[in-house]
Amino acid sequence: MKKSSLNSKLEYYAKDSVVVDRKNEVQYLYGGARVKYEGLELDAEYIEFDNKNKVIFAKGGINEKGRYFGRPIFKTDGQGSSMADSLSYNIEKGSGIVNGVYTEQEGGFFSGGKTKMQPDNEFHVKGTTYSTCNLPHPHFGIHITKGIATENYIIAGPVYMKFEDIPMPLGLPFLFFPKPNKKASGFILPTPGEDATRGFSLLGGGYYLAFNDYMDARLLTNFFTNGSYDLNLVSNYTKRYKYNGNLNFTYSSTRNGLEGTPEYTPQKTFMLGWSHSQGANARPGTTFSASVNAGSSAHNQVTAANGTYDPTRFLQNTLNSSISYGRVFGDGLFNFTSALTHSQETQNKTISLTLPNVSLNMSTISPFDSKKRVGEPKWYQKLTLGYSMNATNTVNTREDLLFTKGGFNRFTNSVDHNIPISLPFTVAKYFNFSSSLTYNEKWDFKTIRNKYLLTETGTQVLTDTVNGFKRGGQYSLGTSMSTKIYGIKQFKGDGAIRAMRHVMTPNISFTYKPDFSAEKYGYYELQQYYTNDLRPGKSQPIEGAYVLDNLGNPLKYSIFPNGGPSAGEQASIGFSVDNNVELKVRNKKDTTGTGERKLAILQGLTFSSSYNFVALQKKLAPINFSGRSQFTEKLGINFSGVFSPYLVEAYDEVIGITGATQSVRTAYREADRYVWNAGKLPRLTTFSFSFDYSLNPEAFKKRNENIDNINKQNASSSRTQEQIDALNAISRDPNAFVDFNIPWNFSFSYSFNYNNPLGRPETRTLNNTLNFSGDFNLTPKWKIQYTSGYDFKAKNLSQTNFSIYRDLHCWDLSATWVPFGEYQSYSIDIKVKASVLQDLKLSKRKGFYTRY
């Protein structure tokens, strides 16, 4: 060929043969042909390259069975791979015609019809189907009769839906799709709906705000014709290697009844969530994080957790938040942290705020040690000194009183200082001793004074707050000794158990602390009765009338509202013993017959108590025990409890005074007498026991792998809210991840709590809970999931959910049913899997608030 006829290098290849027509400058490539020229890559069964006219023609072939094979697959600069039945392309003009194209564009697939490529990167299409189904012959699609696609927009019309090649009476005469190729703000169209209780609705409408490449926001709304509405603001932000986070605020005005009924009164609630995390290397030595979950106590119950029907949310009793900042300075010697914390109890609607909580901690130092020391330190060089400071500004109140007049005057503030000094040493190699001196000092800027009134219903306490600075200091001395005792038993023969090892860790300590409730310190006041006159200044102390303990001594109370120096002299000896028992057993998985593995029978089985020599009564403290056991690799249990060494006795309790007459009733209390003096064993007052088990742990493994794969994607700000919700659902619920490769799964958990402080039937409480969940494949494409439990107190099933999933290749069918209970409801959804067509769905629901 003439050198001037080619503008750049031409590469071509064919498995069968290559025929060159030098006169007309045409190459004919047969069988597995391939051409690369100026950014174009083309593979096909047959390729014809006309070098004179700069035209490439490609098509497939027909095999002996009459099937069309070897379709052209082509790729150009800046475009993905595409497949076609045939194509003709002018590489000089950049134009061509493609028949029967099949190509992927941003999560969707174009197939069929004819496409004309223009020199200005404009595409004219005719008879093409757009679908998210990845089959060359898709199950469904939007059929585009005619259309023009450019870099910035797509114009098409008329268009209509096709299912299994059957045209649907759903179409539009004209469509316009902008393609800004970057984040852009715009309106989000709502989905119309109907609810038996709330009426007709427009759901999910709103506006999307694309501030920049690092931050966006979505404002979504739900409107119902009965007057209910929801407002939801979702914002995500990120800066690579620096920080990322998201904000979610929801406000709802809900009417869950018919007009004229009490439920029709609007219930206005809100919920605020904020999560922020800082990159590990963003600012070395400084940390900032936030985890906020606050709002109206009734929000999740009224809205069924924003319509998710997530039992872990609408059965949640507490809400907690924390915003913290930390900094390390002084060459790592000091650590400063500051946090704003929030705790909310949704049943009693109580709230606790700490604004802020400031801590300063100094690392332990050895003031008498030398950096140039060589060899073992001397005894005095082992002495260590530390310091910590904690300052709080806290309020505990009801949420409806927090923002009322004077609500912030309820805050109490205090500063605690702690200086520990210790000296460890070893005696006879095996006994580890440690002596310590600890000094604590408390600064409060408000103190309290109590008045005790004796009424017909018992003792009433009135508290006055006194502004002013007050300090309180206390100290304690202590020493402790610990060691380890090992016991090993070897078993002979070929039994399953080869050896047993018992490790016992006893610990003995002695502590002395003076009685800081003594009058000379001024930290405590006597609990004195006052006259029952609530008029200002009229209630006066009754001389010689005090609240007494069971020994007839006046009781005292601390003037520090957040707790001050402790009351009562202490000269006590503490003792505890920790036990670990392990078996060495034959490993059945070892085919050689010589393999062994360890099996923990008892871990951390600890008994502890103390004896106070100077206590006026009950010198021996309750006996605590706890432990855990791992019977198999799949089953482990945890348990703990308390034994009381004292007998229970009856006494007459004064419940009111009328004139000179006292009203009494029989009550029970622990006496200062040991149970073994009466020939009895210590009384069990508290016991808890729990375990969980999965019959198919592979399900949890797959679920964790799925979470890891999602987390390996871009930061959370690049995910849609649907993806974020899905990830959260998978994290809290093992069954939320539908994996058809796992044929079945069943897991359950059980907890038992017993409490009876006085060993009386009227003081006994029992709580035991059984929860179970699982799933199974009805067929390779059908999966049924369930979550339930048993309420032993109500003797009935607890919150129960059933879910059914059907894999329809490019579509999903899902149904959720809550058959009974407060949140009885159902929902059925059939939708496209791909998020690009997430609004293409059909839903039918019955809300928990609809009772007919």
Image (cartoon, rainbow, N blue to C red):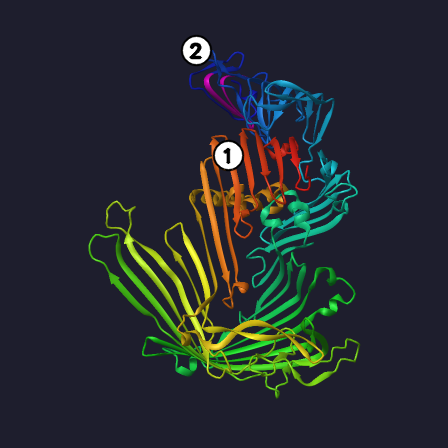
* Residue at numbered disc 2: 64
Residue at image position (51%, 19%) is 71
Q: Would you identify the image quadrant in which residue 533 lies?
A: bottom right
| Along the line of sight, the residue nearer the viewer: 791 or 372 | 791
In the image, residue 251 lies at what x, y percent?
72, 48
The residue indicated by pointer 1 is: 783
Measure the C-alpha gap from mark 2 to mark 1: 42 Å
> Which region shows up in magenta?
30-50
Q: In which quarter of the image is the C terminus?
A: top right
User: Pointer 2: residues within 10 angstroms few (<14), some, or many (20+)?
Assistant: few
Viewer-closest of 517 and 120:
517
Amino acid type, callout 1: Lys
- Secondary structure of residue under mark 2: loop
The answer to which of 403 and 456 lies nearer the viewer is: 456
Vertical relation: 128 (above or below) 604 = above
> Which element type, helix, strand or loop, lies under badge 1?
strand
